[in-house]
Image: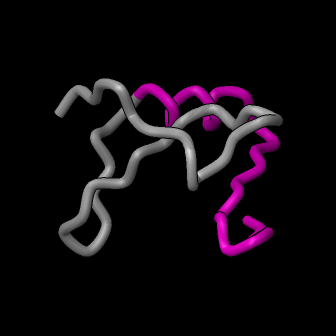
Amino acid sequence: MSMDKDDPTLDFNDEEDFKNVLTKGPWVIFGQYLTVRHWLPNFSMAQDEVESQVV
């Protein structure tokens, strides 16, 4: 895990672990939902919005 520009980034050595994190869930940490998505090169937390979320 790295914290580049205060955004946590996870790197996986195992493809199955990677798939489980993206497809299993929902993830809840300290009572708050955590949105997990595949990283994109042009991603900006200031501009990107979640259009839909299965809860």
In percent of width and height, residue 39 lies at 70, 37
In percent of width and height, residue 27 lies at 32, 49
Using residue 6 as the reference point, say whether residue 47 is left or right of it: left
Q: Is residue 36 above or below residue 24?
A: below
In percent of width and height, residue 12 lies at 75, 44
Please say which color scheme the image uses: one colour
Using residue 2 as the reference point, say whether residue 37 is left or right of it: left
Quadrant into which the C terminus falls: top left
Q: In the image shown, does 26 or 13 lie closer to the viewer?
A: 26
Which residue is located at x 39 percent, y 34 percent? 50
Which residue is located at x 23 percent, y 26 percent? 54
Using residue 46 as the reference point, say whether residue 50 is left or right of it: left
Which residue is located at x 58 percent, y 26 percent? 19
The residues colored magenta run: 1-23
Q: In the image shown, does 11 or 7 lie closer to the viewer?
A: 7
Q: In the image shown, does 20 or 30 lie closer to the viewer?
A: 30
Residue 5 included in the magenta stretch of the image: yes
The number of numbered badges drawn on the structure is 0
Q: In the image shown, does 15 or 50 lie closer to the viewer?
A: 50
Quarter residue 29 falls in: bottom left
Residue 18 included in the magenta stretch of the image: yes
Q: Is residue 28 above or below residue 48?
A: below
Quadrant into which the N terminus falls: bottom right
